[in-house]
Amino acid sequence: MNKKEFLEKLERNLKGLSKEDTKEILDDYKEHFKVGLKKKRKESEIVESLGNPKEIALETKKELMGDKENFDFPSSIMRFFFDIGRVSKKAWKKIKGDVSHAQKKFKDRKNRNYRRWKIFGLVSLNILVMIWILIAFYAVVFSLIVVGFSLILSGLAAIAFSIFILSNNPGFLMKNFSLSGVFAGISVTCLGFLWTIGSFYSGKGLSWLVKKYMQSTKRWTRK
Amino acid sequence: MDTQLKKGVLDLCVLKILEKKDCYGYELVQSISKNVQISEGTLYPILRRLEKEGCLEKYFQESKEGPSRKYYGLTRKGKQKSKELNQEWKEFTKKVNEILK
């Protein structure tokens, strides 16, 4: 592996970190190479002593995750599915292990059954219910944003249309009518902006909820 | 080695070295990996975390040989943390040594 391959592999595996962190980390390694090469070390030797980029990326994520700023929308969805995968794999192993275990021992059966069903229930809840709830929630947020945009657009259209009428020397009644149209248009546009901003924040709040839910899922299954 | 323990110890090493003098990344990595068995790559994430926690600060300085380098220095918070970790380390090793007697 040479320097370029190392950095590429590192960058690929750093996905999910914030842009700033990714850049800082990559810069650090670039500088490491620069200084190392200046000290007459071979490129391959530097790569070797740095270690596996995949592990470094994992280590980096462990060090830096848990920060709010590292939580962004697409990667959270990715992580959600990843978590589902991991939890189901764990649960499957657990169930398999439990079954063979249960054949040997009958003590404590109640407790084990309870845990087994708890994990199983959580997994199916995640897959069957949460996905649809999530999709529905995101659809709601999306439509809220669309509503915001259409408010802005219709406000702008009202302003444009009223100005168009005004410019054609309308009669007294029409003039007043279109003047109020301009102001109505302005207020609808403003409302649209506020609405859009609000929708974005509700989307953010929603992803926060998802994150909390996922964390608690992890905690429940670990016990 | 327990990762939690290792993390604390590496933090302590970084902070202690920077207490003596400001270093650039490569220098710091070399001086730790020379003595402690870790791959050089694992230290940069730790530096970044310590920086984000406010224990380290970064600045650029010209070097004798070519372009400017990123130097790390301790902040007041970093000094405080160094003291705390040092204390923890002493207590920990004392207890372990008692067991080993």
Image (cartoon, coloured by chain):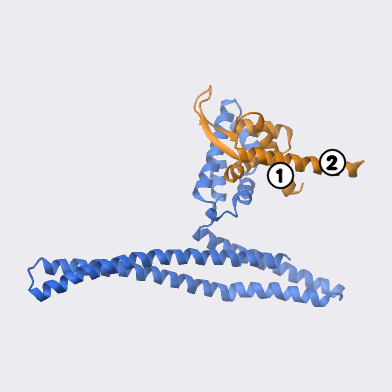
Chain colours: A blue, B orange
Could you tell me residue A167's position as x and y percent?
10, 65
Q: Earlier in the sequence, mark 1 or mark 2?
A: 1
Mark 1, chain letter?
B
**At 59% from the left edge and 30% from the top edge, which residue is drawn?**
A36
Give x and y (percent) for residue A51. Answer: 65, 41
Tell me, yes or no, whether dots 1 and 2 are on the same chain: yes
Q: Chain of mark 2?
A: B
Quadrant where the N terminus of chain A is found in the figure: top right
Circle 1 or circle 2, nearest the eye: 2
How far across and down, in percent of the image, does residue A162 sit?
A: 17, 69
Q: Is residue A74 above or below residue B36?
A: below
Q: Answer yes or no: is residue A3 visible.
A: no
Tell whether A63 sits left or right of A166.
Answer: right
Q: Which mark is residue B8?
A: 1
Is B84 or A53 nearer to us in this picture? B84
Residue that label 2 marks: B94
- In the figure, residue A155 lies in which quadrant? bottom left
Alpha-carbon distance for marks 1 and 2?
16 Å
Amino acid type shown at disc 1? Gly
Q: In the rendered view, would you say B79 is above or below A206?
A: above
